[in-house]
Each structure stands twice: as structure tokens, then as C-alpha cells.
Image (spheres, helix red, strand yellow):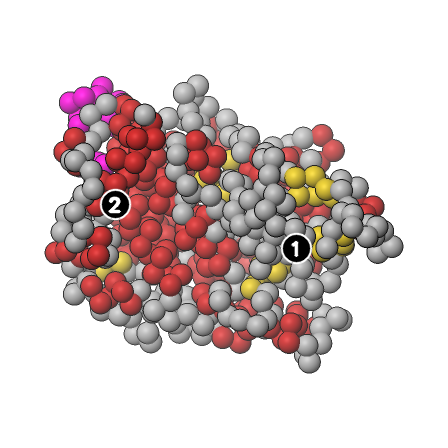
Amino acid sequence: MRIKYINRILMALLVTVGFACSDILDKSPESNWMVDDFYSNETEAQLGISGIYSFIAKTSVYGSDFPIVFDSGTDEGYYNRRYNENWTVGLYRHTAADLYIEKLWTQLYACINASNMFIDKLDKTAFEEDVYNKFVAEAKFLRALSYSHLVAWWGEVPLRLTYSKDQSSNHVAASSEAVVYNQIIEDFTFAYQHLPHSKDADYVPGHANKMAAHGLLARVYMKMAGYPLLDTDKYELARNHCDSIIMDGWHTLRVDADNQGYRNLFLTYIQNTHYLEESLFEISFTNLRDLGLQVDGKIGNLNGVSWTYGGEGYPFGYAMLNASPVVKNNYVTEDVRLDWNLRGYRNSKGNNIEVTSTMSPQYCPTKYRRWEPANWDDLDPGAKPENGNIESYIVLEPVASPNKNYTGINFPVLRYADVLLMYAEASNEISGMPTTEGKAYLNQVRNRAGLENIEVASPDAVLSREAFLKEVQDERMRELCFEGLRKQDLIRWGILGDRLEFLNATIQGDPSFDPKKEQDASYLRAGHNYDETKHNSLPYPLQEVSINNLLDQKDNW
């Protein structure tokens, strides 16, 4: 019965979506479940909310493309297939007709449209006021999250606050970034005022919550303080929202014995077990699958450990994202995050093999690893399985038979470590010098990684605003690498081009780099293709400007 209700609701959502897709708008509903019948009790409201989440869990959003393809092409990592340029956005070879761009835009507006419809059709008379406000707050949280991505990646975008009913709804002019940000702020503010705390007994992991709204609003203010708006007054607001989370006292870093807190935290994402004290908000694929929604992602497959043995039933890894020598060099040996994020191993023909060179196309992130060797000694060059055998391994996903192409690994959208680092950065910008609190919060992140306080390890890093900012920038890479944040960080700092130049210089300076090898030369593509005059934001999708009569394409596109 639950699946039947979901199918009805999602069908109606899709029928009324109107996200610049006229072929959908022209079709008649296949169900007699009318839109005015929606959301008159808690069961229907919960199912409607789940339908909204399904849009951002698609492969074109958090399922894979958004945090992997769109965030590639930075000093952190890049596409490693030398014989094609399929990851166009990460290689800066995209055009307005790019399918990655069209699909991300479409799904984000689909989420917004579903949120708008939910808010409009939720029967206020059927709920107690606090319950009604909680549901509206969750829809507004998801609307704000979607708009925060749209404005960060595209700049001025159409602001749609009512759901689309017919083709005339397509024609909406782009609003200024200031207007869009005002709506995001309003929505996230309503969200933190009315959403539950993640410590509440009835809170469901993967759903919006009060402190996640504070944290994502802080991230919005950090973006507004940087490029392109450069509204530096927003640093204080970002710090204040981070402080609301910190002073609440419930959220904390996971710190386990033997410096295993970082590893064990990411095992919760891989195994869908949740550690809510640090994970403020994550895309929970298991919960959505339990509701009958097919939203499996490719986290740990496209951006994970290479596995080429067998097929279905094995923890296959296409491993298309290479980790850069810049991110590897940013760690010191004793940093426990290095062993988790960049362990360097693969499986080929049943043989577990160590990967040490960043010039290898299998030098891939291991942050979302689907598997590990049962015996790490098998990685030694002389350790090979007998013919017909496969070296033992451990599947980390909680499944008996892994899917070849899809994983159920949850994706972290916001962690407490990010909150601490945003506070450290914002307080430094406000004061013009690193503050006592900022250093303390940076040190919390460092200490969990097994490192000394920054003033001991690198005294020069706390002597000026510029030096401390550089340290925070490096720490964000060490802590948050491959979490879909790096490109927007570099853009808001105004240093994406500089870091791509540094990346290429680092690659070419690697002792094992050979310019005659196509594989090695392919790692330079993003740096060669990047154009500061056009690549700090995306073009509007060609389909959108063709359908929306009030939206003109950007200059240079």
C-alpha cells in the first residue's frame, strides 16, 4: 500500500512539474489522483516529502554527477580517461547544449517545483500548527538547497515560487543573485525555526533538521562574501550561524580510539548506519530505497577504488576520478586522513595491487571505498594469487551481492568539521587576524587527524590573515576532499585559475611524469582548457533558453 501511494504521488508530481519540459506538460495524468487531493494527513505528507528528496538523489544530482563530475577539474582531482572527454564540465569543454548541465538544472528545478506544489497543496486545516510548519519547513529547506546550487553555479536564475501548471509557466526571467539569495535566506531561516533537531527521538536520518539549516545558511553566506558578490559583511552572518551549531553543544567530531574516528565516520556513510553528531545532513539512499524509490547512486563507483574483476556481485569500480598529486602532497605522513582518503590500491584480474604513483590512472580516491583487501600484505608486489584464484577482500557495503554500476553509499552534504572550518575562516576575515576561537576550531579538526595544534606545527600560519586563510584553504582540502565542495570554494576565493596552473606545474614536476605518454598529458586538460572569463559559472541549458522566452543566454555562450 505504501508503494501504491508513492507511485500515485510521484505521478502527480511529474505531471505538474513543468520544469521546462513541454513533452511532459502535454501528457495527461495516468492516475485519477488529483492534485487537490494531496497532503491531507501525515502519511500523504511524509510520502510527498520523500518524493521531493528523490529529485536531489538522482544520479544527475547527489547520486553521482553533481559531487563528482561537476566538482572535478580542480587541484583535488580530474577525469582520467585519456581517450575521451565525456566529463565535459570537469574538463571545461562544455557548451550550452551539454547534457550534464541540462540534467542538473532540470532536476534542481524539479525539486523546487515539487516543493512549491507541496507547500501550496498541504492542507493546513488537517494538521496541528507545529506539524504543519515542520512539513513546510522541510519543503522550504529543500527548495533553498536547490536554489543555493543554482545561484552558485549559474548566477542569475529564474526564481519560481509557485508550481508550474501549464506551458506559460515556463516563461520566467532570471532574477538577480541578490533576489535569489534573499529567498534562500528566508527559506533556510523558516527551516531552522521549525525543523526538529537531529537529536530528537523521532528524527529520521537523511531528513532536514534545524542545525543543518543553520549550517547550509552559513555556507550560503560564505559564498556571498566571496566571488562574485564580494559582500564581505556576510562573513559575520556565516560565523553567527556556525556559532549557533557549536554553542548548541550536541554536534561534535567523531573521535574514536587509535585515531580511527575519521575512518569510522566514513564507514557510516558506506554502511548507512549514520553518525548524526558529526553528519548534519546526508543523502540517505537506503531510506529512500525503503520507500520504494529507485535512487541508487554511483558514489564509490565512479569516484572509488578500481575493480575490474568479474561483474555483477563484485564491488566493481570504474574509478574515473583521479586524485591529484597536489592533494597527496598536502598531507603529512602522520595525518590519518591520508590513509583513508588516498590509500592507493586496486584489483585487477583477482589480484590486489598497491598504487603509489599519482600518474597511474588507478590512483583514485579511497574515501568511499566499496571494498578493502582482507590481508593488506596482498598488496606487496610479490604477492599474487594462483591461477584461477582471487585474493581475499572485504565488501564494506552492507549488501550480500554488490551491484556492478550502482551503490547505496550515502553522501555527506554537511559535516560538523565543515562548520568548524567555516567559523575559523569567517572569524579570520572579520578580525583581520586569526582569532582564539578560530584557531581552536581548526585545531579540533587537526587533532582528530592526529596532528599537533597549528601554532605548534606551523607557527607562521597564525601570524597574519593571509597566512591563516591559506592554512584553512589547505585544511579544507585535507578534511573535505571529494565531498563536492572544492570547486565552489576555489571560485569564491577567486583562485580557481591559479590553482589549476599550480596543478599543472605540480603534475609536470612529478618525477614520473612523461609528456610523451598520452595518459600523463591528459591530466593537464582541465588546466589548459579553463577560461576565467567564462568558466566560473555555467551557461543556461540550451533547452531552457529555447523554451523560456524571457531567458537570454549569457555572454560568451
Amino acid marked by disc 1? Thr
Element at badge 2? helix
Which residue in the structure is indicated by mark 1?
308
The outermost residue toward the right is 382
Taking the magenta stretch, the answer to whether it contains residue 533 is: no
At numbered mark 1, what does the secondary structure look like: helix, strand or loop?
loop
Query: What is the magenta segment's predominant secondary structure?
Result: helix
- Tell me where residue 100 appears, x and y as whole percent: 40, 61
Q: Residue furthest bottom?
A: 516
Mark positioned earlier in the residue sequence (2 or 1): 2
The quadrant of the picture occupied by the C terminus is bottom left
Q: Which residue is mark 2?
A: 14
Q: Considering only vertical position in the picture, is 373 above or below 535?
A: above
* For residue 63, above or below residue 507: above
Q: Please state the horizontal and vertical placement of residue 53, each as a whole percent of the image.
A: 36, 39
Which stretch is magenta?
118-133
How far across and how far down the image is residue 321, in percent? 58, 59
The residue lying at 53 percent from left, 50 percent from top is 405
Q: Residue at x 44, y 19 (%)?
A: 201
Which is nearer the eye, 312 or 552?
Answer: 312
| Residue 123, magenta (yes or no) | yes
Residue 37 lies, with reference to residue 542, above or below; the image says above
Residue in the picture at 20% in, 25% down: 40
- For residue 81, the mark is none
- Left or right position of 133 against 317: left
